[in-house]
Amino acid sequence: INMSARDRINVFPSRMALTNMKLRLKGAQKGHSLLKKKADALTLRFRAILKKIIETKMLMGEVMKMAGIALAETKFTMGADIHNLVHHHIDKARVKVRSKKDNVAGVTLPIFEHFLDGSDTFDMLGLARGGQNVTKIKDQYLKAIELLVELASLQTSFVTLDEVIKITNRRVNAIEHVIIPQIERTIAFITTELDEREREEFYRLKKIQEKKKAARARKEADAAVRNLPGGSRGEANSLLASNVDEDVLF
C-alpha cells in the first residue's frame, strides 16, 4: 500500500500503536454519530422556527394593518391629538420583556417573553368620547407588541441555530472525510508493516532452523565416524581398500 505521510498519522508501527488507532477510530465513529444526531435535531428545530417566523410575520402584517385602521378611527372620533393624550397618561412602561434560556441538543437559545407590570393607565382615557376606539387600538397595539417580542425571540434563535448548524456540519464533514479515512489509512499502514515484519521474522527463523539442522547433521555424522572401529575414516578406508598382501618373512 503506497501512501504518503500526509495521508496518515505519523506513528511507529507496533501492536500498541495499532490498538490505539483502533480505539481512536472507534471514538471518531462514535463522535461522528453523535454530531450527526445533533445536527439532525438542530436542523429539525431550525425548520420549525423558520416556519413559525413566516407565520408570525404574516400575522404581524395583519395586526399592524388592523392597528393602523383603529388608530385612524380613533383620531377621527376623538378629534384631538391622540399622541399628546397618550403621553400625558404614561408614567412608566406597562409591557415589559424578560428573557430565559432554552436548551436544544446542548445549544442554549435565548427566549424572550412579555409580561404586564402595573395597572392600566389608559382606563380613564376616552371617557368623553371615543372610549371604545381607544380600547380597540390599545388591544391591537398590545397584540402587535406581543408578536414583536415573539418574532425577536424566534429570529434570535434562528440566527443562533444557523451558526451552530454550520459549525456542526463542518465538524461532521471533517470527521467523515478527513479524520476517519486518515485513521483507517494509518491502521492499514501499521497492519501492512506488522505483516511484513512477521514474514521477515518467519523467514529468519526458518533459516536459523535450517542452519541448526545442518549443524546437527554434521555433528551426528562426525560422531558416527568417530565411533567406527579403527579410529578415523581415512584409516578404515585405507585398510579396506588395500587388496595386496605383504610378504611374510620367516
Image (tube, grey):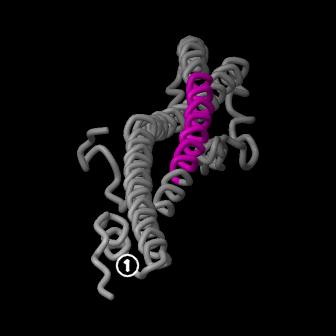
Q: Looking at the picture, tell me which residue is in the foreground, 192 or 76.
A: 192
Relative height, residue 215 to residue 175 (above, below): below
Q: Looking at the picture, tell me which residue is in the foreground, 240 or 22.
A: 240
Q: Is residue 72 magenta?
A: no
Horizontal relation, residue 233 to residue 72: left or right: left
Dividing the picture into quadrants, the one containing residue 74 is top right
Horizontal relation, residue 202 to residue 92: left or right: left
Residue 74 in sight:
no
Q: Residue at x 55, y 42 (%)?
A: 29
Relative height, residue 179 to residue 176 (above, below): below
Locate the N terminus by quadrant.
top left
Helix, strand or loop: magenta stretch: helix
Locate the C terminus by quadrant.
bottom left
Q: Residue at x 25, y 50 (%)?
A: 5
Q: Looking at the picture, tell me which residue is in the foreground, 179 or 164.
A: 179
Horizontal relation, residue 163 to residue 113: left or right: left
Q: Is residue 35 magenta?
A: yes
Q: Which residues are magenta?
A: 24-49
Which secondary structure, mark 1? loop
Q: Which residue carries the number 1 mark?
A: 232
Q: Position of residue 205 (x, y in %)?
A: 43, 61
The residue most toward the bottom is 250
Residue 207 in sight:
yes
Dividing the picture into quadrants, the one containing residue 131 is top right
Relative height, residue 142 to residue 174 (above, below): above
Q: Residue at x 72, y 48 (%)?
A: 117
Q: Residue at x 35, y 53 (%)?
A: 9
Q: Amino acid at mark 1?
A: Ser
Q: Position of residue 92 (x, y in %)?
A: 61, 50
Q: Position of residue 154 (x, y in %)?
A: 57, 32
